[in-house]
Amino acid sequence: MKLLLLAGTGEARRLAQALAQVPGLEVTASLSGATRAPMALPVPTRSGGFGGEEAQKDYMQSNGIEAVVDATHPFAHRISARTAALCSELGLPYVQLLRPAWQPELGDTWVQVASGQDAPAHIPPGARVFLAVGRQTLTEFESLTQCHLICRQIDPPDAPFPFPNGEFRVGRPPFSIEDEEALFRKLRIDWLAVKNAGGEASKTKLVAARNLGLPVLMLARPPQPDGAKVETVEDALTWVQEQMT
């Protein structure tokens, strides 16, 4: 069976490692190309997106794709919605590997919002804000003109910070709780802004914020496509094996 794996997450990497060992399965992973030097996957990999709906449909048909596992980031909702719709149109099995969202725990101070555009209603002027939201979401925080913004990204920036009141900070995960606490202290952070990505690997910044008593602006997930969903790599692997029988 020819399987298309939409990758880009730690779960996708672990799933690719398991799928590479399944006899009779031909896997192609697809990366968006958002990270310049991603770690290699153990299966054939394409990078750079598809170039739109029709181009993706043509790719899937011309390459004989028979099933799709969508293991993209929970905020990659456009490619998820498009792929789910294409699979429905083409009659292909589709499943989304979607990690559970984070939930506030004892000691957390979260403000849950739909968008970074809601930030000025909650973050006071003069605050130093650590934006762990990625550069694609950065523009949502343009209205925090009276705050100092620090945005962390994996790759060195190819352009200056888009607002005069901010700066980039380069860092490649994983980050330990101790690393995050030390960084927040060094930068004198008052607020943490983060997408509700879920998962254990990137949860360390939330634990660090809790330990330091920092409030968190939590961006809610966008709507996800209809269709089959699993929460773990193991369940995704089982789903793939079921499609092969």
Image (cartoon, rainbow, N blue to C red):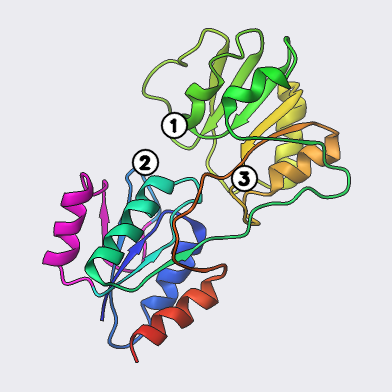
Dot 1: what SS?
helix
Instruction: Point out which mark residue 136 bears.
Output: 1
What's the CA distance linking mark 1 and mark 3?
A: 15 Å
Q: Residues within 10 Å of mark 2 (few under 14, many from 20)?
A: some
Q: What residue sits right under mark 2 in the picture?
A: 34
**Could you say where residue 86 lies in the image, as x and y percent from the top left?**
27, 60
| Residue at numbered disc 3 | 196
Mark 3–mark 2 distance (CA, rounded to whole Å): 19 Å
Residue at coordinates 47% horizontally, 55% vertically from top-left? Answer: 9
Residue type (three-letter) at the residue carrying disc 1 = Gln
Q: Give the residues in magenta.
A: 40-65
In which quadrant of the rendered view does residue 155 lie? Answer: top left
Disc on the earlier residue, 3 or 2: 2
At x 56%, y 21%, the residue is 141
Tell me the crowding category of disc 1: few under 14, some 14 to 19, or many 20 or more residues within 10 angstroms, Cα based.
Answer: few
Kindly indicate whether the residue at mark 1 contacts the one at mark 2 (C-beta within 8 angstroms): yes
Disc 2 or disc 1, which is closer to the eye?
1
What type is the residue that disc 2 sits on?
Answer: Ala
Residue 89: x and y in percent read: 25, 64
